[in-house]
Image: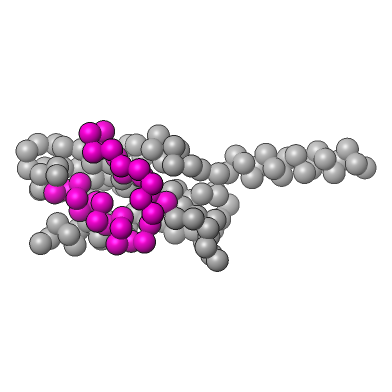
């Protein structure tokens, strides 16, 4: 009986760990998010993305302008175990920049976790309209 308990407990822990994502996971998901191309120079899109993260309430975890990525996160709340977000910016031309947002739940089974993609694009759009 005790062996069955440990087996079931071990399987539950393994399932829980397998369903987790980290900032490294969202960074590695480049190319798998929603993309938009803006008719603005890279620096302006970069600043809009940074400002969008701050305005959204996410915590800025890392940024690397040379490599074109921003990592952000939100920790556990009453409704979620948290979320991890990556924003990638890529210069297309002198006056065009592509922005990609990848948003993942910190725990895959968390059905109430927010998807930050649209919120971040709304924040970026608002800043680039001016």
Count of picture labels: 0
Work out which quarter of the rendered image holds the N terminus and state it. Answer: top right
Residue 79 as seen in the image, left or right of residue 34: right
Q: Which of 91 and 37 is in front in this view?
A: 91
Report which quarter residue 43 is drawn in: top left
**Quick check: can you spot residue 33?**
no
Pick whichever, 1 or 130, lies toward us: 130
The quadrant where residue 86 appears? top left
Viewer-proximal residue among 3 and 69: 69
Up the image or down, 109 lies above or below 119; here it is above
Q: Residue at left 64%, top 45%?
A: 16
Q: Which residue lies furthest to the right in this view?
A: 1
Identify the image quadrant of the C terminus: bottom left
Q: Position of residue 29 (x, y in %)?
A: 39, 37
Q: Residue at x 10, y 44 (%)?
A: 41
Q: Is residue 11 left or right of residue 45?
A: right
* Residue 76 visible in the displayed image: yes
Q: Where is residue 47 in the image (x, y as percent from the top left)?
A: 19, 50
View extreme (left): residue: 94
Magenta stretch in the rendered image: 44-73
Residue 40: x %, y % from top left: 10, 48
Residue at 44% over, 42% down: 23
Is 45 within the magenta?
A: yes
Residue 104 at x, y percent in the picture: 44, 48
What residue is shown at x 23% (from left), y 45% (from top)?
99
Q: Is residue 18 magenta?
A: no
């Amino acid at each position: 009986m005790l062996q069955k308990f440990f087996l079931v407990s071990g399987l539950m822990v393994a399932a829980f760990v397998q369903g987790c994502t980290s900032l490294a996971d969202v960074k590695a998901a480049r190319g798998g998010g929603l993309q938009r191309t803006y008719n603005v120079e890279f620096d302006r899109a970069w600043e809009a993305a940074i400002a969008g993260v701050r305005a959204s309430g996410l915590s800025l975890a890392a940024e690397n302008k040379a490599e074109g990525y921003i990592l952000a996160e939100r920790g556990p709340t009453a409704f979620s175990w948290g979320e991890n977000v990556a924003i990638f910016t890529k210069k297309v031309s002198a006056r065009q920049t592509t922005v990609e947002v990848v948003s993942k739940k910190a725990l895959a089974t968390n059905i109430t976790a927010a998807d930050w993609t649209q919120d971040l694009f709304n924040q970026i759009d608002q800043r680039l309209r001016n």
